[in-house]
Amino acid sequence: MKPSPATTTAVISAIAILCVLGLGGVAAADGDEPLTKKQFIREADNVCRRARARTRRLEAKFFGDWKDPKLDPATLAAFVEANAPVIQNAIDRVRALEEPKADRKRVNRMLDALQGELDAVADDPSALLVSDPDVESDHLAQAYGFAVCGQRSPK
């Protein structure tokens, strides 16, 4: 089955979004004040840039130049298998950050949504061929104020 151009675009966007929330950075040391919202966003956005670069390298390895991407289920599954640990590590690292106390619920909700999306794609990579799993975490990241994380960007 050869996917339509619209499906190809949706898959490319979904793959990119699975990676842009690759957060991490520096946590406040024990006894230090939690990061301010501005600091938290800055740290996360910097790491999102790096995570996006790692994902783009994996995309190139698995899908070539995207002019005629191979979106067959086997290639997609191999990509997800290679990229899922990158995203999981990022989720774990941001959970270790000292987010602003007032934002703890919002940050956890965003990370829980991303974890659920990652788990769903890891369980069934072919779901990327029919839907965009990142809608909730994207929305939550954008609403929180991230400039890079959760934002769709062109290749």
Image (cartoon, rainbow, N blue to C red):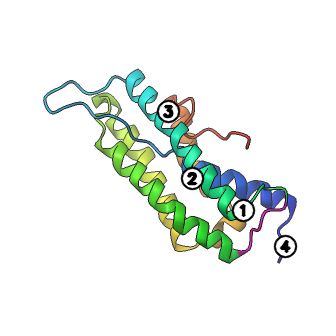
- Where residue 87 sits in the image (x, y, percent)? 47, 54
The amino acid on which the numbered mark 4 sits, given as a three-letter code, is: Lys
Checking the image for residue 2, the label placed there is: 4
Query: Which residue matches tag 2?
Result: 18
The amino acid on which the numbered mark 3 sits, given as a three-letter code, is: Asp
Range of magenta residues: 68-72
Magenta span includes 70: yes
Q: CA distance from mark 2 to mark 1?
A: 16 Å
Q: CA distance from mark 4 to mark 2?
A: 23 Å
Foreground residue, 61 or 77?
Answer: 61
Question: Which numbered disc, 2 or 1, marks the residue that appears first in the sequence?
Answer: 2
Question: Which numbered disc, 4 or 3, marks the residue that appears first in the sequence?
Answer: 4
Query: Which residue matches tag 1?
Result: 63
Question: Which numbered disc, 4 or 2, marks the residue that appears first in the sequence?
Answer: 4
- Where residue 75 sits in the image (x, y, percent)? 67, 72
**Residue ID at (44%, 42%):** 23
> Is residue 59 toward the left or the right of residue 1 in the image?
left
